[in-house]
Image (cartoon, rainbow, N blue to C red):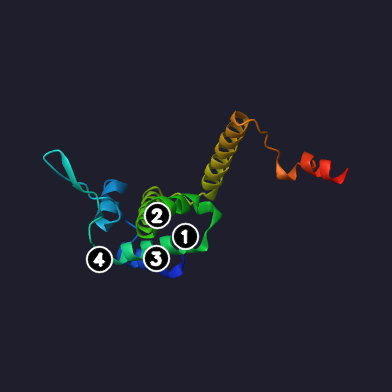
Amino acid sequence: MPGLQTPTVSTLFTELGADLSAFPASDHFTSWLGVCPDNRISGGKVLSVKTRHVKHRVAQALRLAAQSLSAARRCSDASSAALRAKLGAPKAITATAHKLARIIYHLLTTHEPYDETRLAQAEQDHRQRTESRLRSQARALGFQLVPANSGREPSFLKAVTK
Protein backbone atom coordinates (compact mmCIF):
# COMPACT_ATOMS: atom_id res chain seq x y z
CA MET A 1 0.00 0.00 0.00
CA PRO A 2 1.45 3.40 -0.90
CA GLY A 3 2.78 5.43 2.01
CA LEU A 4 3.12 2.51 4.43
CA GLN A 5 6.68 1.44 5.12
CA THR A 6 7.85 -1.32 7.43
CA PRO A 7 8.07 0.81 10.62
CA THR A 8 4.55 2.14 10.07
CA VAL A 9 3.12 -1.34 9.51
CA SER A 10 4.93 -2.71 12.57
CA THR A 11 3.50 0.17 14.65
CA LEU A 12 0.02 -0.62 13.34
CA PHE A 13 0.20 -4.30 14.19
CA THR A 14 1.91 -3.71 17.54
CA GLU A 15 -0.74 -1.26 18.69
CA LEU A 16 -3.84 -2.72 16.99
CA GLY A 17 -3.20 -6.33 16.21
CA ALA A 18 -4.95 -7.99 13.29
CA ASP A 19 -8.39 -8.05 14.90
CA LEU A 20 -10.48 -4.87 14.65
CA SER A 21 -13.73 -6.49 15.75
CA ALA A 22 -14.00 -3.97 18.61
CA PHE A 23 -14.97 -1.39 16.01
CA PRO A 24 -18.29 -2.04 14.23
CA ALA A 25 -17.47 0.32 11.35
CA SER A 26 -14.61 2.37 9.95
CA ASP A 27 -16.25 5.51 11.34
CA HIS A 28 -15.78 4.19 14.87
CA PHE A 29 -12.18 3.27 14.14
CA THR A 30 -11.26 6.68 12.69
CA SER A 31 -13.03 8.46 15.54
CA TRP A 32 -11.07 6.41 18.08
CA LEU A 33 -7.86 7.39 16.32
CA GLY A 34 -8.88 11.04 16.29
CA VAL A 35 -8.32 11.57 12.56
CA CYS A 36 -11.90 12.45 11.66
CA PRO A 37 -13.79 15.71 12.24
CA ASP A 38 -15.47 16.02 15.62
CA ASN A 39 -18.60 18.05 14.98
CA ARG A 40 -19.51 19.88 18.16
CA ILE A 41 -23.11 21.06 17.84
CA SER A 42 -25.13 22.86 20.48
CA GLY A 43 -28.67 24.04 19.88
CA GLY A 44 -28.42 23.29 16.18
CA LYS A 45 -25.39 25.55 15.82
CA VAL A 46 -22.05 24.07 14.73
CA LEU A 47 -19.49 25.19 17.28
CA SER A 48 -16.42 23.39 15.97
CA VAL A 49 -15.45 20.82 13.34
CA LYS A 50 -11.84 20.31 14.35
CA THR A 51 -10.36 16.91 15.07
CA ARG A 52 -10.00 15.81 18.66
CA HIS A 53 -6.56 16.06 20.24
CA VAL A 54 -5.68 12.40 20.68
CA LYS A 55 -2.15 11.21 21.36
CA HIS A 56 -2.19 7.81 19.76
CA ARG A 57 0.79 6.05 18.20
CA VAL A 58 -1.32 4.67 15.34
CA ALA A 59 -2.68 8.12 14.50
CA GLN A 60 0.85 9.53 14.56
CA ALA A 61 2.07 6.73 12.28
CA LEU A 62 -0.79 7.34 9.85
CA ARG A 63 -0.11 11.08 9.81
CA LEU A 64 3.55 10.36 9.13
CA ALA A 65 2.58 8.04 6.27
CA ALA A 66 0.24 10.69 4.89
CA GLN A 67 2.98 13.29 5.08
CA SER A 68 5.41 11.02 3.25
CA LEU A 69 2.80 10.48 0.55
CA SER A 70 2.35 14.19 0.01
CA ALA A 71 6.11 14.86 0.16
CA ALA A 72 6.79 12.16 -2.43
CA ARG A 73 4.09 13.67 -4.65
CA ARG A 74 2.99 10.26 -5.85
CA CYS A 75 0.79 10.40 -8.92
CA SER A 76 -1.57 7.92 -7.25
CA ASP A 77 -2.31 10.37 -4.47
CA ALA A 78 -3.72 13.25 -6.47
CA SER A 79 -6.48 13.75 -3.91
CA SER A 80 -3.86 14.57 -1.28
CA ALA A 81 -2.42 17.33 -3.47
CA ALA A 82 -5.89 18.72 -4.11
CA LEU A 83 -6.68 18.71 -0.40
CA ARG A 84 -3.37 20.39 0.33
CA ALA A 85 -4.20 23.21 -2.09
CA LYS A 86 -7.71 23.57 -0.71
CA LEU A 87 -7.23 23.16 3.06
CA GLY A 88 -3.54 23.69 3.73
CA ALA A 89 -0.87 21.19 4.69
CA PRO A 90 -1.86 20.23 8.27
CA LYS A 91 -5.51 19.59 7.48
CA ALA A 92 -4.61 17.75 4.28
CA ILE A 93 -2.28 15.45 6.19
CA THR A 94 -5.04 14.66 8.70
CA ALA A 95 -7.56 14.08 5.88
CA THR A 96 -5.13 11.74 4.10
CA ALA A 97 -4.46 9.92 7.40
CA HIS A 98 -8.24 9.51 7.74
CA LYS A 99 -8.37 8.00 4.25
CA LEU A 100 -5.49 5.62 5.05
CA ALA A 101 -7.22 4.56 8.29
CA ARG A 102 -10.41 3.70 6.38
CA ILE A 103 -8.42 1.68 3.82
CA ILE A 104 -6.54 -0.18 6.58
CA TYR A 105 -9.79 -0.92 8.41
CA HIS A 106 -11.29 -2.34 5.21
CA LEU A 107 -8.22 -4.47 4.46
CA LEU A 108 -8.02 -5.91 7.98
CA THR A 109 -11.73 -6.66 8.35
CA THR A 110 -12.34 -8.15 4.90
CA HIS A 111 -8.92 -9.84 4.54
CA GLU A 112 -8.70 -8.63 0.93
CA PRO A 113 -5.39 -7.64 -0.64
CA TYR A 114 -4.80 -4.00 -1.55
CA ASP A 115 -5.81 -3.38 -5.16
CA GLU A 116 -3.98 -0.43 -6.72
CA THR A 117 -5.84 -0.84 -10.02
CA ARG A 118 -8.85 0.86 -8.42
CA LEU A 119 -6.70 3.88 -7.73
CA ALA A 120 -5.31 3.87 -11.28
CA GLN A 121 -8.85 3.66 -12.68
CA ALA A 122 -9.97 6.59 -10.52
CA GLU A 123 -6.97 8.60 -11.74
CA GLN A 124 -7.77 7.77 -15.36
CA ASP A 125 -11.42 8.79 -14.86
CA HIS A 126 -10.30 12.08 -13.30
CA ARG A 127 -8.00 12.74 -16.26
CA GLN A 128 -10.83 12.08 -18.73
CA ARG A 129 -13.20 14.42 -16.85
CA THR A 130 -10.55 17.14 -16.77
CA GLU A 131 -9.82 16.76 -20.47
CA SER A 132 -13.52 16.89 -21.33
CA ARG A 133 -14.00 20.01 -19.20
CA LEU A 134 -11.01 21.73 -20.82
CA ARG A 135 -12.23 20.84 -24.32
CA SER A 136 -15.68 22.28 -23.63
CA GLN A 137 -14.17 25.46 -22.15
CA ALA A 138 -11.90 25.86 -25.19
CA ARG A 139 -14.85 25.33 -27.54
CA ALA A 140 -16.85 27.98 -25.68
CA LEU A 141 -13.98 30.42 -26.17
CA GLY A 142 -13.59 29.54 -29.85
CA PHE A 143 -10.45 27.40 -29.56
CA GLN A 144 -9.69 23.79 -30.35
CA LEU A 145 -7.38 21.65 -28.23
CA VAL A 146 -4.81 19.50 -30.03
CA PRO A 147 -3.07 16.72 -28.08
CA ALA A 148 0.68 17.20 -27.76
CA ASN A 149 1.47 13.65 -28.86
CA SER A 150 -0.68 13.78 -32.00
CA GLY A 151 2.30 14.37 -34.30
CA ARG A 152 0.58 17.31 -35.97
CA GLU A 153 2.46 20.57 -36.19
CA PRO A 154 0.61 23.58 -34.77
CA SER A 155 -0.72 26.01 -37.40
CA PHE A 156 1.27 28.97 -36.08
CA LEU A 157 4.51 27.05 -36.69
CA LYS A 158 3.49 26.32 -40.27
CA ALA A 159 2.82 29.99 -40.84
CA VAL A 160 6.25 30.94 -39.44
CA THR A 161 8.20 28.36 -41.46
CA LYS A 162 6.67 29.27 -44.84
Query: SS class of the residue under badge 1?
Result: helix
**Number of other residues with Cα within 10 Å of mark 1, as a class: few under 14, some 14 to 19, many 20 or more:** many
The answer to whether residue 102 shows anywhere in this view is yes
Which of the numbered marks, if any, corresponds to residue 70? 1
Between the C-alphas of marks 2 and 1, the distance is 9 Å
Left-right relation of 112 to 159: left
* Residue carrying label 2: 96
Q: Amino acid at mark 3?
A: Leu
Q: Quadrant of residue 104?
A: bottom left
Q: Amino acid at mark 1?
A: Ser
**Number of other residues with Cα within 10 Å of mark 3, as a class: few under 14, some 14 to 19, many 20 or more:** some
Between the C-alphas of marks 2 and 3, the distance is 10 Å
Which one is in front in this view, the residue at disc 3 or the one at disc 1? 1
Left-right relation of 41 to 34: left
**Number of other residues with Cα within 10 Å of mark 4, as a class: few under 14, some 14 to 19, many 20 or more:** few
CB under 8 Å between callouts 2 and 3?
A: no
Q: Nearer the viewer, residue 70 or 10?
A: 70
Residue at 24 percent of width and 49 percent of height:
49
Query: SS class of the residue under badge 4?
Result: loop
* Residue carrying label 3: 64
Q: Quadrant of residue 144?
A: top right
Which of the numbered marks, if any, corresponds to residue 55? 4
